[in-house]
Image (cartoon, rainbow, N blue to C red):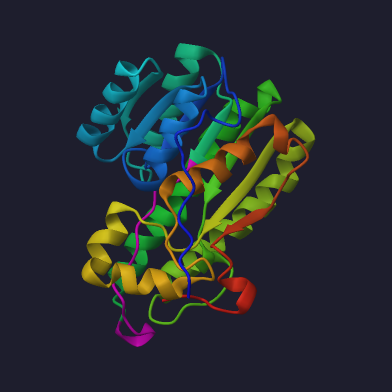
Amino acid sequence: MVTMAAPDRSTKPQHRFDDRVALVTGGASGIGAATCELLAHAGAQVWVADFDLASALALADRLVAAGAQAQAIALDVTDPQQVKNVVQACWQRHARLDIAVNNAGISQSVNGLLQTPRSQWSDVMGVNLEGVWNCLQAELAVMAPARSGAIVNVSSRAGLVGHPQVAVYTASKHAVVGLTRSAALEFAPLGIRVNAVCPGLVRTPFVERKLGERLEEVSRSANPLGRAADPMEIAESIAWLCSDAASYVVGVALLVDGGALAGGSTGK
């Protein structure tokens, strides 16, 4: 298989978000960090929200030093009151919230269903599903009166097909897709677009740590492109869903997996 290189990302952002306010959860690393960078350099005022405040602060400082607008805030998406407080802080400062990217999520250890402890179910569902639910409730509460906004929930290829040995993670990401579609139908009449993005294998720091020396081998067989996605490639898809270019796109679960599922592969 010939590996297709990722495209050069040094060009200007394809979409502009001047004067818009964006909140990105799990914004300090991986897909979240790439999304923060892309939106900020495209003119948005970005709130980098993450459980890891130190990393969020470091990213926000780098963006500000580069001439962008960003600030960091600590956020545990499993705490509904904390989520509400963060969204309210954003609203009180800017009197608007135009974009929300609900990206915070965790994986699970590879286990057979019968060997998976209940504590892992609670942990994964608490972040991946209840965290998105908490964010949606707080975000939509301020977007609905304004009758405007774009929300992208980060699901996964595992939100569209089954994966063995990661049943809890797969269930959580399927639920995010269902939640996205239901919210989209309810709030589209109010001018709010809710969509999801479903990435395949992405070269994030977490994936690099998890796969280690196996990353290149797994990447070559993951999809027809023969490589893992760069986080910025997923961020570009998220930015498009948030942009005016996607003004007629509502309730989709956008698969961004390098063609893996086109051939029936669920990856590893």
Q: Please state the horizontal and vertical placement of residue 81, each as a whole percent of the image.
A: 39, 35
Q: Please state the horizontal and vertical placement of residue 21, each as a whole percent of the image.
A: 52, 22
Up/down of 198 relative to 225, above or below? above
The foreground one among 8 and 46 is 8
Residue 95, quarter of picture? top right
Residue found 30% across the figure and 84% down from its top: 115
Residue at the outermost front position: 2
Number of numbered discs? 0
Q: Is residue 186 magenta?
A: no
Q: Is residue 237 left or right of residue 203?
A: right
The foreground one among 223 and 247 is 223
Q: Is residue 212 left or right of residue 127?
A: left
Q: Quadrant of the C terminus?
A: bottom left
Residue found 54% across the figure and 62% down from its top: 257
Residue 243, quarter of picture? top right
Up/down of 43 relative to 169, above or below? above
The foreground one among 241 and 49 is 241
Residue found 47% across the figure and 56% down from its top: 129
Q: Please state the horizontal and vertical placement of residue 220, each as a whole percent of the image.
A: 41, 72
Q: Is residue 135 left or right of residue 262?
A: left
Up/down of 155 relative to 142, above or below? below
Q: Which residues are magenta?
A: 102-115
Q: Main secondary structure of the magenta part?
A: loop
Up/down of 94 relative to 86, above or below? above
